[in-house]
Image: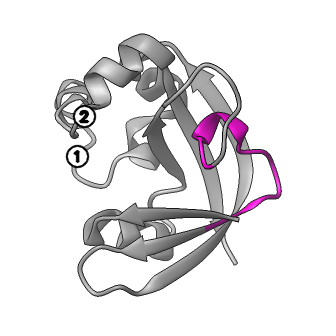
Amino acid sequence: MYELKLNPRAFDSIISGLKTIEIRAGKCKDSCGQCVCRMQKNQLINFTNTFDGKLLRCIIKRVQHYDSVRKLLETEGTEYTLSSTNDLEKGIKSIHNISDYKERIIKYGVYAIELSPV
C-alpha cells in the first residue's frame, strides 16, 4: 500500500473521473521502499487531501516511465494528467515548479500512474 498526498484540485479531479493519471517524479534508480519506481498494476494507493485530510483509495491500473514531462504529456494527454490546465507548455512549467521535481526528473525520469478509485 502506498501513501501519497494530493492537493485538493487534483484530489477532486481524480474522484470526479476527470484526472485518471497521476504524475510523479522518480526518486531513485533502483527499487526502494515507497518509491514510485516500485509501483505495479493492481497495487493500492491511499491519497490524502492536503487541505482537509480526506482519504481516497485507488488501484493502480498501469505505471509508465518517461524521460521527460513533455514526452509524458504528449503521450498520455493533458486532459487525463493535469487538473490545472490542458495547455502543454503551461503543464510542463507547472510540473517543473513542484518542489525538486525538475532536478529529479532530469536524474530519474517521471512516471504516469493510471488510477481507478476503489
Pointer 2 or 1: first along the chain: 1
User: Residue farthest to the right?
Assistant: 42
Q: Quadrant of the N terminus?
A: bottom right
Image point 67% across, 23% down: which residue?
30
Image point 47% across, 47% down: which residue?
80
User: Residue farthest to the front?
Assistant: 33
> Per the image, is 21 magenta?
no
Regarding mark 1 in the picture, which secondary structure is present there?
loop
Please tell me which residue lies in front, 110 or 74.
Answer: 110
Q: Position of residue 7 (x, y in %)?
A: 28, 65
Left or right of 49 in this view: 111: right
Placement of 39 over or under 57, stated as above or below: above
How far apart are labels 2 and 1 at the CA level? 6 Å
> Per the image, is 36 magenta?
yes
Q: Position of residue 70 (x, y in %)?
A: 37, 18
Q: Amino acid at mark 2?
A: Gly
| Disc sitting over residue 91 in the figure | 2
Which stretch is magenta?
A: 34-45
Residue labelled with disc 1? 85
Image point 60% across, 19% down: which residue?
29
Please tell me which residue lies in front, 76 or 95.
Answer: 95
Q: Which color scheme does this rendered protein use?
A: one colour
Please tell me which residue lies in front, 34 or 49.
Answer: 34
Left or right of 97 in this view: 18: right
Please tell me which residue lies in front, 109 or 118.
Answer: 109
Left or right of 93 in this view: 45: right
